[in-house]
């Protein structure tokens, strides 16, 4: 088996396992939400406290066996999928004979791996099962698009990329993308939970069965605190990414800054997340205001990865693949 075939087989396997994990996490989330909803109904109806207490518990032992089994399958599929994802990325590097993040395809498959890795690391410190469906779902989408749309044959590096800064600059940027992706999932859940709990939505679907899974999600304040920590870490790393990119530009092109589209959008992302952290910590922008700003930051990140690469012409055009 060649490195190319190994990489493709491993990545497709990871994509399938992530999809299985997504369904497993979704089933677990739905079952836990049903249990919590039942508990609320018991309390509202004035039922005995001893009947409501087990239903309100979030431990696996209080959930239906189908939910416990689904969670076990999801966790196993996520772990094995992450390993296959890593094998696929490593095999791509062997095939290309350089670090595997020189074009959009390689950046995508590595970013998916990092996002799942961040989720697994956070999961070891606290129970964030509620994020599972969103994170592995995003990874499934990224791998699927990468393999089906962005795939390109491995090739040698252009002169501008033949530098140690490729390892330093792009690897940190990829890690940042994974962290910001997880923070995006957390922030989206925060907003949905906030609108649903506040009862201010103009549509019934936010309070109906369509979003009943939010019963199993922590409070908006807890989600906001988690998103803030993730974004703070990502921001520090993104600051280093911008600085490392400037140093690399000076080595490659003889200037630190040249208003290249990729440079400009990288700075725009930095400004948005800096504004988020500043507003969140010093201006009292808690709740929905800060959440909207965090979503704008992630949208800018996606624009930097897609539109800037496909539409704008600049010195980073080689990233198109």
Image (cartoon, grey):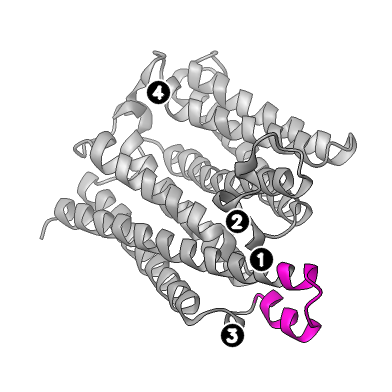
Residues at marks 4 and 1 touching, judged by CB atoms closer than 8 Å:
no
Alpha carbon separation for disc pair 1 and 2: 8 Å
Q: Is residue 84 left or right of residue 297?
A: left
Residue beneath disc 2? 212
Q: Secondary structure at mark 3?
A: helix
Kindly report the secondary structure that dominates the magenta region of the rendered protein: helix
Q: Is residue 252 left or right of residue 159?
A: right
Magenta range is: 41-58
Residue 86 got which mark?
Answer: none
Say if residue 237 shows up in the picture: no
| CB contact under 8 Å: marks 1 and 2 | yes
Q: Is residue 158 above or below residue 15?
A: above
* Disc nearest the viewer among 1 and 3: 1
Which numbered disc flags the more N-terminal residue, 1 or 2? 1
- Give the Cα distance between marks 4 and 2: 38 Å
> Residue 66 at x, y = what percent?
45, 77
């Amino acid at each position: 088996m060649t490195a190319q075939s190994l990489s493709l087989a491993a990545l497709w396997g990871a994509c399938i396992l992530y999809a299985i994990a997504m369904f497993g996490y979704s089933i677990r989330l739905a079952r836990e939400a049903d249990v919590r909803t039942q508990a609320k109904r018991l309390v509202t109806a004035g039922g005995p406290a001893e009947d409501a207490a087990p239903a309100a518990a979030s431990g696996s032992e209080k959930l239906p066996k189908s939910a416990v089994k689904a969670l076990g399958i999801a966790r196993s599929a996520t772990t094995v999928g992450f390993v296959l994802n890593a094998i696929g990325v490593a095999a791509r590097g062997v095939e290309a004979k350089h670090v595997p993040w020189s074009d959009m395809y390689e950046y995508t498959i590595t970013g998916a791996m990092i996002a799942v890795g961040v989720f697994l690391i956070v999961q070891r410190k606290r129970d964030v099962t509620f994020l599972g469906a969103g994170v592995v779902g995003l990874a499934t989408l990224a791998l699927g698009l990468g393999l089906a749309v962005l795939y390109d044959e491995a090739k040698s590096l252009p002169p501008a990329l033949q530098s140690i800064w490729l390892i330093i600059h792009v690897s940190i940027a990829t890690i940042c993308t994974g962290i910001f992706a997880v923070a995006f999932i957390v922030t989206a859940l925060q907003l949905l939970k906030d609108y649903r709990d506040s009862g201010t939505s103009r549509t019934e679907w936010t309070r109906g069965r369509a979003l009943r899974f939010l019963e199993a999600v922590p409070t908006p304040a807890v989600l906001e605190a988690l998103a803030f920590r993730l974004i703070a870490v990502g921001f520090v790393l993104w600051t280093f990414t911008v600085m490392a990119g400037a140093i690399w530009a000076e080595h490659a092109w003889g200037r630190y800054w040249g208003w290249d589209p990729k440079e400009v959008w990288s700075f725009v992302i930095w400004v948005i997340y800096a504004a988020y952290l500043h507003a969140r910590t010093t201006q009292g922008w808690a709740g929905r205001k800060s959440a909207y700003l965090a979503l704008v930051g992630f949208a800018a990140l996606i624009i930097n990865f897609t539109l800037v690469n496909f539409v704008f012409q600049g010195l980073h055009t080689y990233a198109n693949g």
